[in-house]
Amino acid sequence: MGVLSHLKGKLENKLESKLEELRISHNSEQQQQHQQQQQQPVNQNYQQSYNETQYASSKYDRPPASAPEIPSRDYVKSSNKRFNLGSTNEVFTDDLFSSPISNQPPVSQIPQTATHPVKLPERYKSSSSDIDRPIQTNNFYGNFLVDEQNLPVWTHPYSVWQSKDDQFKGLAISHTSNAQKVFGDDPASNPVKYFFNPVAICSIVLGALEFQNESYTFKVGELERFSCGLNWQLNNRPGSMTSHILQGMGFITVVYENTGLTPAIGSKVGFQNFESCGKLGNNGNDSMWKFICTLFDGVKWVVFSNKEGLTMRNPNLISMNSNSDKGTIIQVAKLTNGDVNQYDLVAGSYPTAMSLFGQVNASGESAKYGFKYQTSGGSQSGETIQWALPHQYLAFDECMNDKEIKGMVLDSTCKGVMKAYCCSEFVMAETLPSPQIQFDPWSETKGFTGYSKEALDKIRQVAETEVGGFDVINASNTDSMYTAGKILDKGAFMLFVVARVLKDAGLTKTFLEKMKTAFERFISNRQQSPLAYETNWKGIVSTAGLKDGNFYCDFGNCFYNDHHFHYGYHIHAAALVCLVDREFGDGSFYDKCKDWIETLIRDVANPSTLDKYFPVFRSFDFYNGHSFANGLFAHGDGKDEESSSEDYHCYYGIKLWGMVTGNDQLEKIGSLILAIEKRAMNLYMLYTSDNTTVPDNFKANKVSGILFENKIDHATYFGMNKEYIHGIHMLPTTPISSYIRSSRFIMEEWNDMKLGDLVQTIDDGWKGILMLNLADADPQTSWKFFSSDQFQERWLDNGMSRTWSLALCAGVGGCP
């Protein structure tokens, strides 16, 4: 039994208690203790402990040497339409996200169901099509969609939530600085095991006096990939407040849409001083009144409104003198460096939506992508203000050079220092993966070296036994899309080796038929737990747990957990089988599996809103630079991911599928996402010694462990063993691994974490995972391990083969 399959039982039996230990204990005691230290009480309201944002019970689970020329493959390439992007003279292809993969329903063998254990949130209707659109399940605003809808949502640098506390009802706002971070278990250790930012420091609440005494309904709406709308509506008479929540927004803005509400600003920290700065100059649509409020913690916030009359009533309340006029706007933001005028040029403008664009240049070597902001209101500059994370501003195109507001920075929760930009769009540029990174082994330092006779002889010896003895048809017959995907991918790697490395036609043809038969079970949806298209949230889910709501089935697949992990294995495996079938088979596999595979791709990475059956990019977050694995669960630290490697494996698979099938769009989308992840993951998840993004007393862990939106926990959901924490960021090791995980990083991790000593003590599949990872930095040591006559099969994870391991090691110089 493979490592992760073996651990599945442990996960099911021990997860709840482990989560209590890892998550809730140091977030119930230490959060509350630290909150008392951060917020010095000034009145009874301020002293009260927060009760609405307690953590929900979680249920989840040297530059590269030139490589040899790779032989050309018979990949079909589509023609490129071209146009110029901005002021650049480069020629770029069409927008990658303008066309859907398909606008047809999911394949017919996957039935539809209206059953799902998580009910949809109550939504307001902004257009005739708004209610029936696919809803994001792994998105940053997920806490607004599930359970009590009152846990924090991280827009970065702020967090916001629906406050239901007496006297503080409305949209609550917080920002934490690095000085407020909590470290543990032992804060004096280096490295610490985790750090988090205190939640529910209710610095500002935007609401209305009427919310305190009258009933109202909270709804969400306009649920887009990068934004959502919030609405508070009085139940018994007109009175409505709305806000649009976007990633990176510079202001938190609310709009009072009619005259039934009296705008109010609250603070649990308390207002020490509230100063009117008068009226700004002409702001475009409206002039804005400006105010500075100083809280009892010494932090200053700026308030702008298009209506005058805001007055401090008591240390916890500021309100207008009368009911709002229709269209009354209030905006707030935290002052960053004592300059009270830093926001003046952008006051009055606020984004309501954010759209994605991306183009690849004609050579296929680089790409530009970014966000366009749809705004309302007006400002003196004609622009709005947005905050950028390090992986964004380090990649900014030259057109962004004059957009930065110099000296204006705020700390993010886990991703370093953010910078402010006065703009209406972000434009980033990335170098795409080398075209040499395809199917053959590849490393950053060696490229693809080819194979010596000695290497081929050893690979053949192992493959004849291993391939002949691998019953992929029955081994993949499991109740888990994740486990089955790993096993199919294991077989696909073996198939590639016998076909493309050994060029053994007989063995290839025999095993190819087995692989096609194994896939047929899933393509026809006859696996133990078939898939279904559920029409509520709109996506492909496992029926395991669908009716009874059992989260533990298939790692929470039906709750939209880990879809890019699960389906990524199937997508990658299918690309390899399709490649080999065209050369050694009858070529029928492509026609057989195309619609099914592309249905899975649409579920994970639908690029276009024109596809009405799936949300846009369910898993990958273009703002954060990586995917989120957590699905439909409320969590006090926001969305998370514990495996960077299974994340990029998905998009590597999509890239290869596009390459094999001639789908230029998918190949380029896969390449772009991989380029973004290379930068982001090496800032936020994989730490070399010169990393300045994460705290100095954490980066010596070398890997994040679980990266949340609000904390990083050097742990896994299935155990605390060092090999688990590091290995889950390694598997599977493929040609794309060295593109993300540099040889420098691999050797630092290996030496600093003493993985060489650790591996000597391991006697299961994690041993193989660690040793194959080493191939990208020290391929000869890795080759010696896998080619040894003393090698034991139990040292292979259930998604690994010795055949592929030897081929990878040898192909990057392990056996000259």
Image (cartoon, helix red, strand yellow):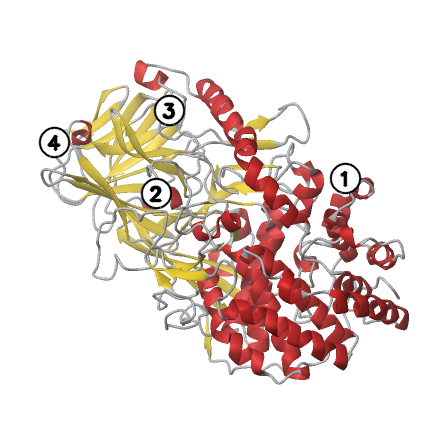
Q: In which quarter of the image is residue 302?
A: top left
Q: Earlier in the sequence, mark 4 or mark 2?
A: 2
89 lies above or below 411: below
Q: Where is residue 187 in the image (x, y as percent from the top left)?
A: 62, 24
| Residue bearing mark 1 | 752
Q: Which of marks 2 and 1 is nearer the N terminus?
A: 2
| Residue bearing mark 4 | 322
| Contact (Cβ within 8 Å) of mark 2 with mark 1 | no
How far is the residue under mark 1 from the one under mark 3?
A: 40 Å
Residue 632 appears left or right of 16? left
Name the element at disc 1. helix
Q: Residues within 10 Å of mark 1 (few under 14, many from 20)?
A: some
Q: Position of residue 405 (x, y in %)?
A: 44, 45
Name the element at disc 2. helix
Name the element at disc 3. loop
- The mark found on residue 144 in the picture is 2
Q: Is residue 413 visible?
A: yes
Amino acid type at circle 4 is Ser
Amino acid type at circle 2 is Phe
Q: Position of residue 172 (x, y in %)?
A: 33, 33
Name the element at disc 4. loop
**Labels 2, 1: front one:** 2
How far is the residue under mark 2 from the one under mark 1?
A: 41 Å
Q: Residue furthest left?
A: 237
**Labels 4, 2: front one:** 2
- Quarter of the image with the C terminus in it: bottom right
Q: Residues within 10 Å of mark 4 (few under 14, many from 20)?
A: few
Residue 228 appears left or right of 297? left
| Residue bearing mark 3 | 50
**Labels 1, 4: front one:** 1
Residue 267 appears left or right of 653? left
The front one of 225 and 426 is 225
